[in-house]
Amino acid sequence: MSPEERDPFAIHGDAINRVWKKIVDLGCRNASQALHSMLSTPLEMTGIVIAFMPLSKIPFLAGDPEGQVAGIRLLFSGEVSGHMLLLFPQETCLQLVNLLMGQPPEAGQGSSSLGEVEISALAELGNITSSNFIKELANFTNLHISLTPPEILLEMTATVMQETLTTLSATTNKVLTIEATFSSMGYHLEGYFFFIPDPPSLDIIMEKFWEILAR
Amino acid sequence: MTDQHLVHVGFGEMRFSTDPEDVLVAFGLGSCVALSLYDPLKKLAGVIHIVLPTDEGRNNPLPTKYADKGIRLLYDGMIEQGARKSRLIAKMAGGSSIFKHNYPVSKMEIGARNVEAVLEALQGLKIKVSGQDTGGKCGRTFRFFVGSGKAVVRTLSEQKEI
């Protein structure tokens, strides 16, 4: 096979995208169920797969590169490894924490910073979202994957993304970018969810997809 | 400031300018280090966005990403465009420690190692650093104003000239 033929993006691009979409949809559905069992008010998560894009483009995706965001980062390892990152603008974080606490997003406006309780609520959200996505990916590919506890970073968008890039020590990383929406009580809050496999791991995952699709 | 032109110095990139309206900017530096070299007579500026201390002799494709190779390229570029070594002013920012956990040991002090590597490279070229804001735990944006030779560092909580 020529390298082009082996490139899972070049052939069956649509089929591959459908697999990602299915994993994201199932992950979101399970995450919503997990959130529902934990919270007094249902909080539904939906995800729209935007694209696989180079990580270097992302500081500008969320708008102002100097704008403050909360990044919830988890590492995954096992047969494949990499990072997952949930990114929310600062204002959205405060509103999201309110929804998690079963209050309207605007409740308690005036406090503009995140305290310990808020940070731990966001960390839990990162845990639930990421672990359900990873579970679906592991189920589908039959790969063993485990997660580290989340780490929260309150910084400029550019800082969060560049630090992630630095750890990967590569600029060619492709990132699965998902627009994540959390909905409750008629409110919809948006953030981004990034799945950033190490380059050899993305090849392994694609190889699995390819095998399954070829069956 | 509104008329001035922002020139983005991205991850691992290097930019030069003699346009007095230009502002060379490296956004949200964490462990990365931005270094500017400036010849005030020529009003020539160069800024590099260093990511790692060394490419460990691997001849990686983007040499400007590494302090050991990149700073030499920045210096050579300045001299080629007419800067005098004796007039060069160096300013730098970044090299903080952002993420706390989950790192292999070698990655942990990447910010500090970047700062050290930049200082070492400058020492090798016998260029003194006249402004520096490095270390700590916060992200920084580095702006270099070509016309005035001013360097301004901004974090989420403050802004200062170095």
Image (cartoon, rainbow, N blue to C red):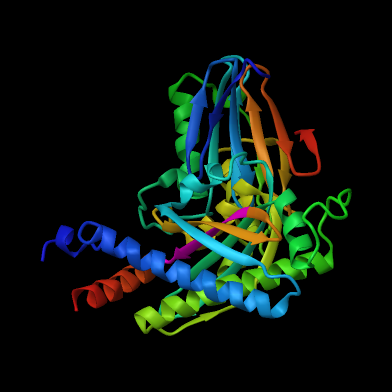
On the rendered structure, is B30 left or right of A99?
left
Verify whether residue A113 appears in magenta: no
- Provide residue A87's location: percent of width, then percent of height: 61, 56
Q: Is residue A175 above or below residue A212?
A: above
Quadrant housing residue A131: bottom right
Q: Is residue B116 visible?
A: no
Q: Which residues are magenta?
A: A190-198
On the rendered structure, is A46 left or right of B56?
right
Q: Is residue A147 above or below residue B29?
A: below
Please tell me which residue is depicted at 56% across the width and 72% down the height of the picture. A130
In the rendered image, the quadrant that contains the C terminus of chain B is top right
Please tell me which residue is depicted at 57% across the width and 66% down the height of the picture. B107
Please tell me which residue is depicted at 74% across the width and 67% down the height of the picture. A100
- Provide residue B127's location: percent of width, then percent of height: 61, 35
Please tell me which residue is depicted at 68% across the width and 70% down the height of the picture. A42
On the rendered structure, is A200 left or right of B131?
left
